[in-house]
Structures are given as structure tokens and as C-alpha cells.
Image (spheres, rainbow, N blue to C red):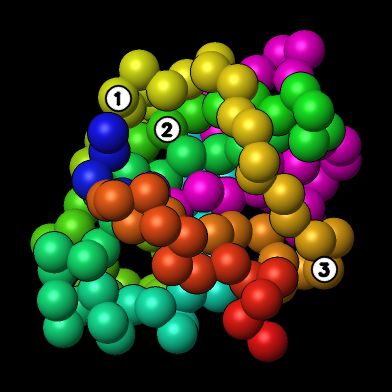
Amino acid sequence: MTGGALIVRNSFGGELAPGRPRLDPLHPQDDVIAENLRRYWLLQRLVPGWVADPTTCPRVILSAAGPPKHRFVPGASLIDVARIGTGDPKDVPLVEPLALDAFDLRGRMLSGVRFDLGRQSHFMWVTADGTLAYDTRRAR
């Protein structure tokens, strides 16, 4: 449906780092969701391949929040594929940072999306045909 997706974990709770707030499910703020979609993902292994063959680059990044049985999408944004690899490799360039309902995914429930608790295990890449191409739980 999306042409490939980068699915990132969006945690609840206090700040992720000084000045970088986490998602508050009771009071979601679009700027917080957009910021947590955009960065800080350890994509160094993936970006060179996406730059070499832009057709493999995911077209949308979506956040996954909540416990596995009740995981939902707080926001989904289109990735600016033309800008992949031009900035910080931990940042995902977004077409419109505050447009958070790409493909009408916002608010939908997700099944089968699980993450480890480790700092580097909070994203996965699903290709256009639905294949799990990269899962940080298995990439070590």
C-alpha cells in the first residue's frame, strides 16, 4: 500500500534526551510526533543502499506506539526520497513534517510489530511487497 515503510517505535513517558519529549498518548502533539518520526534512527547500514537504488527506499515512515496487543499509529509521514543520504544519516527527511496521516495510517492498529527494548532496536523496514527487509532485532 505504501511502496515500502520504515516503522519506528514511539515510546510513552518522559523525555528521550534533554529537550526531546516523548509521545503523550493522552495529549498527542503533532510537533512531538513529527520530531520522533524524523530522528534519531541508526540507519547507517541502510542509507547507502537506498541512495544507490532509490526504488528500494521506503516511501513512508510511521510510528508504532503502545503495547504489542494494542499497538497503533500516532503518525505517518511521506519520506522525501530525493533527500535520503544528503543530511545526517540518523534523520529521515520528510516531505511535510507536520502532515502525519500519510496513506490514512494515523490511528490504525498494527499487529505483529514488535521491538526489543535495546536502544538500537527500535525500527524496521518493510519493502513495497510486504517483506521484512530489516529488523534491528535480527541485524546484529
Q: Earlier in the sequence, mark 3 or mark 1?
A: 1
Neighbor class of circle 1 (other Cα within 10 Å; few <14, some 14-19, many 20+) is few
- Say which quadrant the C terminus sits in: bottom right
Residue 103 circle label: 1
Q: Position of residue 39 (x, y in %)?
A: 52, 57
Residue 99, magenta (yes or no): no
**Mark 2 vs 1: CB contact within 8 A:** yes
Q: Above or below — where is 129 with respect to 43?
A: above
Q: Which residues are magenta?
A: 5-33
Three-letter code for the amino acid on which mark 3 is drawn? Gly
Tell me which residue sits at (34%, 77%) in the image: 47
Res. 19 in view: no
Q: Earlier in the sequence, mark 2 or mark 1?
A: 2
Tell me which residue sits at (55%, 74%) in the image: 42
Res. 88 in view: yes
Q: Secondary structure at mark 1?
A: helix
